[in-house]
Amino acid sequence: MKSESGLKLAYLCAVLNAVIIGFSFLFTKVALEHANPVDTLTHRFAVSFVVMSIPVAFGWVKFKFRGKLLALLLLATMYPVGFFLFQAFGLQHASSAEGGILYAFTPIVTMVLASVFLKEVTTLFQKVSIFLSVSGVVLIFVMKGTDFDFSNFTGIFLLVMSSLAFAGYSVLVRSLLRVYSPTEISYVMLGIGFVSFSAVSITTHVAAGTLDLLLAPLTSGSFVVSILYLGVLSSLVTALTANYALSKIEASRMSVFANLGTVVSIIAGAIFLGEEITVHHLIGSALIIAGVIGANRLGRKKVTA
């Protein structure tokens, strides 16, 4: 039986995760003014991996890899590698609003996968709550005047694959957390992410003869600050908090917290960018928050696996 203190910490980690991701949109906008998406990912995961390698090098964090190594590799392939690459290339063919709408459906996909592979049971109230949260995000983007172009098959397909990758990670990590600690899994995720994004970025620049452009953004103070936030907080800390939360909370219930990032990004945009908060923002945010609370508090059942 999960301890009450462990659950409270897990929920705190889930909320912290959503807050950090919500603010990450601001820093991503700044970073992308100086580098393309893949180069930004390379710098981001280089920072996160180097920072986490420090306590590992000093022996403050111990690792003991045992069994299920292929599953661990598959996990990192899903997230962060698959998720971010599908998202980056998908957004080259589709709008960020379309990406936001499709990503909002991730909790539903996670719920289905978790019920199939983890035998997680959700009540009717929880299902309704998850759909409520998704509808809040969709409302916000639709009321912004988003024109969803279904003829844009490439962009939509890649963004759907991005959501599937994240849902797959949420489900697979629950199984791996029975073998590995959240810290061990996070370190592997960050390491494989760093190697993968670096390989794609360097290969692309070498082929184009623009390798010097990879390090050029580091001369910008705003880019460095953004990368530090994205690398340390939005990659390292979110990996640790998400993996810890998933060790205590079912994947179907944890996934709905991701939509809280939309609420945080609205607040961040209003505070730092002077963006207007409208009635549909308030209604959509209320639906998201109600959905998160409902999915985690109403009619909970024990996991059968």
Image: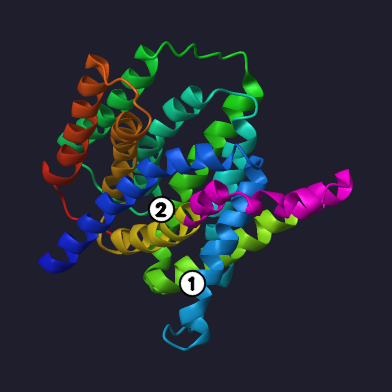
- Please report the residue visible at 48 percent of the width from the left and 72 percent of the height from the top: 52
The boundaries of the magenta stretch are: 201-228
Residue 35 against residue 105 in the figure, above or below: below
Residue 52's disc number: 1
| Label 1 SS | helix
Q: Amino acid at mark 2?
A: Val
Residue at left offset 49%, top offset 82%: 56
Please give left or right for residue 56 compared with residue 179 in the image. right
Kind of residue sitting beneath label 1: Met
For image coordinates 56% across by 45% down, the residue present is 84
Q: Nearer the viewer, residue 231 or 4?
A: 231
- Which residue corresponds to mark 2? 171
Q: Nearer the viewer, residue 233 or 215?
A: 215
The correct choice, above or below, for 8 with respect to 89 in the image is: below
Tell me the element at label 2: helix
Residue 185 lies, in percent from the top left, at: 46, 68
Q: Is residue 79 visible?
A: no
